[in-house]
Image (cartoon, grey):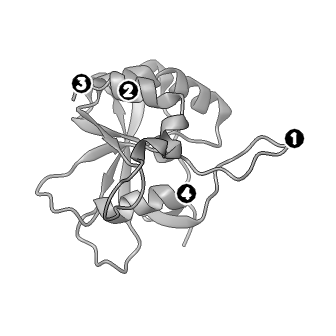
Amino acid sequence: MEAHSHQPLDARQNQIRLLSVDRNLTSTAKVQCHLEAFNLDDAPNFSALSYRWEYPEPSDTQLPSPKVSRSIVVNGKTFPVSENLANFLDVFHKQPQNKPIWLWIDQICINQRDVFERNHQVKRMSTIYSQCETVIIWLAKASDAYVGALKDPYFTRVWVVQEVLLARH
């Protein structure tokens, strides 16, 4: 299957990309999604995901980049994602829902290969999180109990403060 490539956003149009996850899949199939660009001012209601990217151990010679270990299908093409994000999508696509839910997930909705777009969109994250309907916080796969949940590496991220505090719900 061919690899997904992002269509450029028009920065003058205040565009963002939103992801819709197909919820009619069997549990063994790859997660299938649709990615679409919207003007932020006219975008449908959406939820923003706050989660922890996975990084390898940092080295003195190289900046860390996310560990990519799984793939999903976006607009009919393969798209690599981190294990933690794949786990979220595995759980999310199995939740019953009658209407499409749009998500903003930085790892997918921002073209991470385009430095200009990535920098531009990162500067807009406070606006994106303040205009979303809800923020979904994903710590990890569910377990019997979250003893010591606040010790999770998620809470070591600087982004957590703005992502949670700027949400309307």
Mark 1 falls on what kind of element?
loop
Q: Which residue is mark 3?
A: 168
Question: Looking at the image, which is closer to me, 27 or 145?
Answer: 145
Q: Which residue is mark 4?
A: 82
Query: In the rendered image of this protein, does residue 127 appear above or below residue 47?
Result: above
- The reply to whether discs 1 and 3 touch (Cβ–Cβ < 8 Å) is no
Question: Who comes first in sequence, dot 1 or dot 3?
Answer: 1
Question: CA–CA distance between discs 4 and 1?
Answer: 23 Å
Q: Name the amino acid type tagged 2.
A: Ile
The reply to whether residue 74 is in sight is no
Question: CA–CA distance between discs 4 and 2?
Answer: 22 Å
Mark 4 vs mark 2: give the one in front.
Answer: 4
Q: Which residue is mark 1?
A: 60
Mark 1 vs mark 2: give the one in front.
Answer: 1
Question: Looking at the image, which is closer to me, 77 or 167?
Answer: 167
Question: Who comes first in sequence, dot 1 or dot 2?
Answer: 1
Q: Which residue is mark 2?
A: 128
Mark 3 vs mark 2: give the one in front.
Answer: 3
